[in-house]
Amino acid sequence: MIALAPFASRFPFEVFIAPRRHHHSFAEIDDAMIGHLARMLKDVLSRIKRGLDDPAFNFLIHTIPNIKATPKRTAYWDTIEVDFHWHIEIMPRLSSVAGFEWGTGFYINPPPPEEAARYLRDLAP
């Protein structure tokens, strides 16, 4: 697993966690990958808790849709296993989405992602 601060993160201290090797479906990960994910989540969430004073956060799992269902369009999901890489997003709730963000779709993120990543990385595990 790898944890990273997205280059154009929308929120302060936003973190992505993803497998290092391509994998399309969170539901199909094996026991070894579950163990790696558990250790990574514990590490990242403990750093967020200690370094940011235990904030509330949003936690999203992005994975492929049910490809066993019959799609409305022929061959719609044929390449999804190659095109999509599952990942987790963790977004500490340190700021509020306000009028500018709602009106434009652009997010204001005061700390540069590089500095946020450095701050979390430098915390003792």
Image (spheres, rainbow, N blue to C red):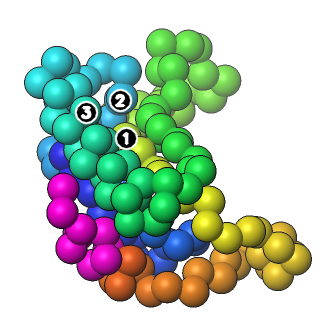
Per the image, the residue denoted by label 2 is 25
Quote the CA–CA distance across marks 1 and 3. Answer: 15 Å
Quote the CA–CA distance across marks 3 and 2. Answer: 17 Å
- Amino acid, disc 1: Trp
Disc nearest the viewer among 1 and 3 = 3
- Residue 17: tell me if it is visible: no
Circle 2 crowding by C-alpha within 10 Å: few under 14, some 14–19, many from 20:
some
Per the image, the residue denoted by label 3 is 38
Magenta region, residue range? 117-125
Residue 87 placement, left or right of 59: left
Considering only order in the chain, which callout, 2 or 3, is on the residue closer to the N terminus? 2
Residue 94 lies in quadrant? bottom right
Q: Which residue corresponds to the image point at 67% horizontal and 70% vertical from the top-left? A: 95
Up-down relation of residue 61 to residue 14 (above or below): above
Q: Position of residue 119 (x, y in %)?
A: 31, 77
- Asked which secondary structure carries label 3, the reply is helix
Indicate whether residue 119 is drawn in magenta: yes
Considering the image in quadrants, where does the C terminus appear?
Answer: bottom left
Q: Position of residue 55 (x, y in %)?
A: 55, 56
Up-down relation of residue 82 to residue 109 (above or below): above
Disc nearest the viewer among 3 and 2 = 3
Per the image, the residue denoted by label 1 is 86
- Asked which secondary structure carries label 2, the reply is loop
Quote the CA–CA distance across marks 1 and 2. Answer: 6 Å
